[in-house]
Amino acid sequence: MPQYNRKSKATTKGAVMLSAAAAMISSRSGGIRVAKAFSMPSTKMAASPSPFLRSSLLFSSAASADTDTATDAPTLINNRLSRASLPSSLDARSLSENLEVVLSHLTSRRASDKTLEDAKTISALNSDRVSLIQKRDVSLQQRNECSAQVGKLMREAKGEETDEIKSLKEKASKAGDDAAVVEEELSNIESKVNTLLASLPNLLDDVVPDGKDEGANELVNEWGDVNALPKELGWTEEFEPLWHDDVATNLGGWNSEAAVGMSGARFVSLTGSVARLERAISSYFLDRASEKGYIEVSPPLVVSRSALEGTSQLPKFEDDLFKIVPESHTCNGEDAFLIPTAEVPLTNMHANQILEEADLPLSYVAMTPCFRAEAGSYGRDTRGLIRTHQFYKVEMVKITTPETSRDEHEKLTRHAGECLEELKIPYKKMRLCSGDVGFSAQLCYDLEAWLPSTKEYREISSCSNTGDFQARRMALRYRPEAKADEGEAAAAAKKGGKKKKAKKPKPVLCHTINGSGLAVGRTLVAVLENYQTPEGDVVVPEVLRPYMGGLEILKKK
């Protein structure tokens, strides 16, 4: 899991929505907020008590014992079945009805055999659920019919309990008990399916290329000339550009030994002009995002387990997180964690809410420290700032409708790319392949900046469209704008009657998008390396000079 992967013109509507959000992020009840994989409706249950009724976003509200639907055979795209039949993220029912498509996407992601088996298990459990619902509904119908007969006979007998009434009461009681037993079985299935669904990654957008790893990522476009800045700064053919940590050391701003001494490996302390340059980069990114309409947020750095489940870092990536011991702090009884990215609190600000379509898209930006244990990166990028446990990142998040999410994803990615262009740092835009795309993303672009010390491009931003994958987990929905039926309106006008009010549409899952705009530490790396001079100085990029008090050159000590 890459360290930086996942990743003012503030409007009044967005500012109002922030008022109560921060307190909610760290205070939700445990477990995945949408804790139900199924809904259990039945036309036979009008008289049944509430324990037999469940609401759910992880199973279609139209669920019934009969789950057969007619679908066209999916086509093969990028060596996997098209997800055209599955425009939304998975629930138990859609997975069961499209199992071959799901297995095709998991295989394309190079998922483990266990993950493939988990998908098959969900499908099997869903079949069990269907038969159990039929069994439960029969018992509930029998209970309701017996109860109705008891009421009728009691009225006829004027309150006297006859043998027939006693018999019917016993039958109603037994039927209710039978239904309760089945309900318990359904609850157990639901719990198993919730756990298994949480372990499955998002389905892939059809445009994602097939491939095993980053070597199969697809170049979308590249910007800049890697020789332009060297020529401008007077690099000669003999000059060997230094690593960023050596450049920072020459400026008197690198103190890794002190950081390691107090905090351990993969921590760094920056001082003087280098620390100031880092701050200038973050301020520039924030101001630029605000100019593009993003609302700046200062979010909590400690979040609950359920917040991380909502954005899908949990349960799969717990080893990569910094967990706070319960004796020190809990989030209203839940496990507490340091944030791995501002994506978590920014997206969770609207968890369990129903927004209005007129308020979308919402665009947020935050600059925060991020904390990652990097459990799976032992021995990789041990030098410098490329991969550390603590780093600063400016994160951009958008909450959109399904219809606008693709365009908004492109806009967000473009906003990140423009930062590099204004810094005059060459970069590539890559479309990640199926084996490299992140767990929650259906489509992801990486921006890779040029580093002259190693003569390679390195990831500096990941911009992901998760579709409704995160929104389903955190119950984030919007209500589409009501549209009056033109035919009914015309008929009413013709008759001189009043115009009927448009029906209130049902809430729909939002889409969420996130991306680094940019990773501050890695941008500092790119600036130090690309703007170094043969004399050991560093020229301050023009767009950063206002944030450096007009300073144009950082001098070698």
Image (cartoon, grey):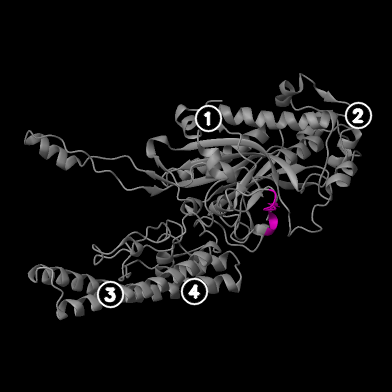
Dot 2: what SS? loop
Q: For this view, does 435 lie left or right of residue 225?
A: left
Work out whether 407 lies above or below 57. Answer: above
Q: Which of marks 3 and 1 is nearer the N terminus?
A: 3
Identified by mark 4, the residue type is Lys
Q: Residues within 10 Å of mark 3 (few under 14, many from 20)?
A: some
Identified by mark 3, the residue type is Ser
Of 509 and 465, the residue lying toward us: 509
Is residue 320 found inside the magenta-colored segment of the image?
yes
Residue 409, percent across and down?
52, 43
What label sits on residue 556 in the rendered view? 2
For the record, the magenta segment spans 319-328
Q: Which of marks 3 and 4 is nearer the N terminus?
A: 4
Give me the C-alpha separation between circle 4 and circle 2.
Answer: 62 Å
Residue 490, percent across and down?
13, 37
Give me the C-alpha separation between circle 1 and circle 4.
Answer: 44 Å
